[in-house]
């Protein structure tokens, strides 16, 4: 009997301690929101951006170059990738390099990173941005299309992590940024495989953060997941936008999205959405019956039509 009482007392004590820790963390979060820390410098960092040949990737590469980073642009589109480097250099920033790479091929990725090490140095910031987004009803997707989507949107992350993470751990310095999506926050019609891939990116990054935290691996290696709404990059070929909501849910500009991503990385944010209210909205809706989320989606009336 006494053993059970002691056990219950210990559990009650642990719960009280947990509650105090939660309250202190909430207060700390409020203070950090009101009085944010200065943005960390990325000057001199070797930043590798996948999918740098156009769109968000190109704009991210430009932002880092402007902040004094050494930028390595990776893309299977050699012409677009070279154009990004030339655009950076035309702005007066010469530390930009272009490498053609099919990020879906593990051996090619590992070989390319080895070449980058020899030519430029060890990657200290990885921006896993490359992605594709065919939009069909699920049963209209061809099997090879689904496989390709996961190769680009998910498996490529693993090959890049395998290539750059060991050195970051060894030096206890680095940052991994992964591009998920609003489609990784909430399921959307006409995007079943795409949503699955973007949910996978979030799951991969969240579990990787936990692995590092619980195992106390490389405390100065950081992880960030970006979840933007639809961006006007050409990837969204047939967007559905609710005009009644004005600019609230209009297609986002790649340059402004890149600005938010780079700034959030410099703040060491873990997960964020663009616009920011989507993250809170997504978490909040899961507290209610499923139909509440469906009603909100119907009200927003935005998404992707079939290609």
Image (tube, helix red, strand yellow):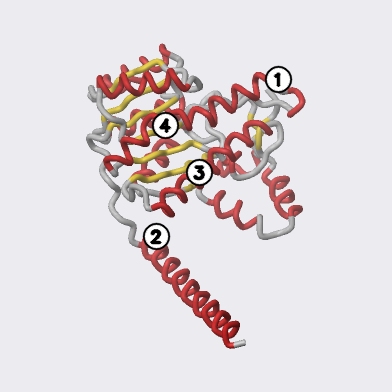
Crowding at mark 2 (Cα within 10 Å: few <14, some 14-19, many 20+): few
Residue 142: assigned label: 1
Instruction: State which tag comes first along the sequence, 4 or 3.
Output: 4
SS for callout 4: helix
- The residue positioned 71% from the left and 47% from the top of the image is 299
Q: Is 173 placed left or right of 8 in the picture?
A: left
User: Nearer the viewer's eye, disc 1 or disc 4?
Assistant: 4
User: Nearer the viewer's eye, disc 1 or disc 2?
Assistant: 1
Q: To which residue does mark 4 refer?
A: 162
Q: To which residue does mark 2 refer?
A: 33
Q: To which residue does mark 3 refer?
A: 274
Quarter holding the N terminus is bottom right
- The residue positioned 45% from the left and 24% from the top of the image is 51
Query: 157 or 259, which lies in front?
Result: 157
Quadrant housing residue 246: top right
SS for callout 3: strand
User: Nearer the viewer's eye, disc 4 or disc 3?
Assistant: 4
Q: Is 143 placed left or right of 252 in the picture?
A: right
Q: Position of residue 113 (x, y in %)?
A: 35, 23
């Amino acid at each position: 009997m006494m053993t059970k009482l002691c056990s219950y007392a210990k559990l009650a004590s642990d719960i009280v301690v947990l509650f105090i820790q939660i309250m202190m963390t909430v207060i700390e979060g409020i203070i950090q929101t009101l009085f944010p820390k200065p943005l960390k410098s990325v000057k001199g960092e070797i930043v590798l951006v996948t999918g740098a040949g156009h769109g968000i990737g190109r704009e991210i590469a430009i932002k880092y170059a402007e902040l004094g980073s050494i930028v390595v642009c990776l893309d299977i589109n050699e012409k677009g990738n070279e154009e990004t480097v030339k655009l950076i250099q035309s702005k007066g920033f010469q530390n930009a390099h272009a490498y053609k790479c099919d990020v879906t091929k593990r051996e090619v990725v590992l070989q390319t990173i080895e070449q980058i090490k020899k030519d430029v140095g060890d990657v200290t910031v990885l921006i896993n941005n490359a992605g594709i987004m065919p939009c069909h009803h699920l049963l209209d997707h061809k099997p090879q299309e689904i496989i390709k989507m996961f190769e680009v949107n998910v498996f490529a992350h693993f090959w890049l992590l395998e290539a750059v993470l060991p050195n970051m751990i060894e030096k206890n310095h680095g940052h991994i940024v992964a591009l998920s999506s609003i489609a990784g926050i909430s399921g959307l019609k006409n995007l079943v495989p795409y949503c699955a891939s973007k949910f996978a990116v979030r799951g991969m990054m969240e579990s990787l953060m936990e692995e590092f935290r619980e195992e106390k691996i490389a405390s100065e290696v950081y992880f960030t997941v970006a979840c933007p709404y639809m961006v006007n990059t050409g990837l969204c070929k047939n967007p559905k936008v609710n005009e009644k909501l004005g600019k609230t849910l209009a297609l986002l500009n790649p340059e402004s999205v890149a600005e938010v991503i780079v700034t959030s990385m410099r703040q060491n944010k873990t997960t964020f959405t663009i616009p920011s209210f989507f993250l809170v909205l997504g978490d909040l809706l899961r507290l209610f019956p499923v139909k509440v989320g469906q009603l909100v989606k119907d009200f927003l009336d935005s998404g992707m039509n079939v290609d």
